Amino acid sequence: MCVTMVQVSSSNTDGEDPSRRIDAVDKDGMTPLHWAMRLKHEKVAELLLRKGANPNLADKYGETPLHFICQRSHDVDFAEKFFKITDEINRPVEIDAADKAGVTPLHWAVYNKHKKLAKLLLRRGANPNLADMDGQTALHVLSGCYDDDELAANLLLGTGGESNLADKARLIFNGKEINAVFDILCLVTIAFILFHTFFLLKKMYLKNSI
């Protein structure tokens, strides 16, 4: 592993394309960037990205470096730096990349209770409605692991904590988005249905438990 890291950062003396060397894969399809993320070598990861490492390459399991960020206990600051660097080098990250089991980075962030990271992914455009091979969305994962009403609301609305409703209201007030009216009505209707369904189920549960 250490030898590989030295090799990819050394000067190119044999005419080989440097991008091929920096993205060299091992028997598991992992690149040096995968390893840097897996081992939490954050400075090495930053160096690799700035040297041209591809942030979207997947290993043999279909996992990208972003999957590893969400699997490990990286803090949200590093995730933000990861996105900042990829934005600077114009290498957009595939935010909804799914591994061979259909699991996305958002699935992992929610499963590992990385609330801030999950909200960051949502702000970056992660789709909370994508399901894995078992039909589980991020909301299913959240419901099966722990209770978090705020994150559940974020997943339902597809936001990272910033109010889509408030944004839509501003557009309506400024007369710039008439479709926003229908969006708000749909969201309010969904919230109403979910609210009453919850209390109906709770009432049935209490009745049956007596």
Image: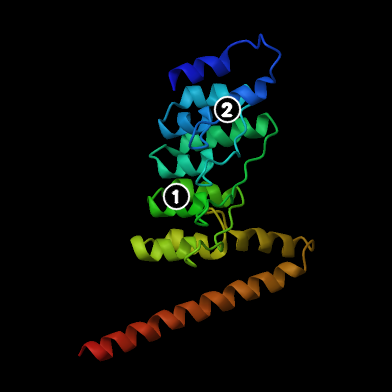
SS label for mark 1: helix
Q: Amino acid at mark 2?
A: Ala
**Residue 84 drawn above or below residue 210:** above
Residue 124 visible in the displayed image: yes
Identify the residue shown where x is 70% and y is 33%: 90
Please, which residue is most extreme toward the front here?
A: 27
Which residue in the structure is indicated by mark 1? 109
Quadrant of residue 168 within the rendered picture: bottom right
Marks 1 and 2 sit apart, C-alpha to C-alpha, by: 27 Å
Coloration mode? rainbow
The image shows residue 66 at horizontal and vertical percentages of 52, 41
Label 1 Cα crowd, 10 Å radius (few <14 / some 14-19 / many 20+): many
Q: Amino acid at mark 1?
A: Ala
Please, which residue is most extreme toward the left here?
A: 210
Residue 149 visible in the displayed image: no
Which residue in the structure is indicated by mark 2? 24
170 left or right of 64? right
Identify the residue shown where x is 64% and y is 71%: 184
Q: Quadrant of the C terminus?
A: bottom left
SS label for mark 2: loop
**Residue 23 drawn above or below residue 201:** above
Q: Quadrant of the N terminus?
A: top left
Between residue 136 and residue 167, name the one nearer to us.
136
The image shows residue 15 at horizontal and vertical percentages of 71, 13
Identify the residue shown where x is 66% and y is 34%: 87
**Residue 131 drawn above or below residue 27:** below
The image shows residue 95 at horizontal and vertical percentages of 59, 47
